[in-house]
Amino acid sequence: MKDRLDVTGARWSLPGGEAILLLRAVIANGDFDEYWQFHVRREYQRTHAVLYQEQLDIAA
């Protein structure tokens, strides 16, 4: 893995490298489908639910 991150011209940040390692571990463990569902739910909350939170608070 170090060779891939250390290849000439590659500009990996620490968070980017860690994200790739996490993804490789999730795939190797056979947990990708469960992880992807979790990721999709979190992205929805991050991009949609937060945008409408103020409207939900007013309606309540």
Image: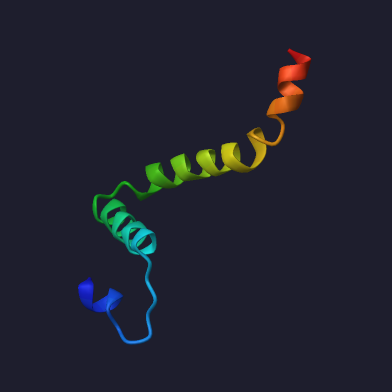
Report the label total.
Answer: 0
In the image, taking residue 38 as reference, residue 32 lies left or right, namely: left
Asked whether, in this view, residue 59 is left or right of residue 47, the answer is: right
Q: In the figure, residue 1 lies in which quadrant?
A: bottom left
Between 34 and 12, the one nearer to me in the picture? 12
Point out the residue furthest to the top here.
60
Quadrant in which residue 53 is drawn: top right
Does 2 appear above or below 40?
Answer: below
Name the outermost residue toward the left. 2
The image's colour scheme reads rainbow
Name the residue rendered at 39%, 42% in the picture: 34
Pick whichever, 16 or 39, lies toward us.
16
Q: Position of residue 18 (x, y in %)?
A: 32, 58
x 39%, y 44%: residue: 35
**Depth check, front residue: 26 or 9:** 9
Q: Residue at x 25, y 56 (%)?
A: 28
Up-down relation of residue 29 to residue 42 (above or below): below
Give the residue drawn at x 28%, y 50%. Answer: 30
- Residue 29 position in % (x across, y down): 24, 50
Left or right of residue 39, residue 22 in this image: left
Residue ranking furthest to the bottom: 8
The spot of residue 7 in percent (x, y) is 29, 83
- The C terminus lies in which quarter of the figure? top right
Give the answer, above or below, for where 38 lies relative to 18: above
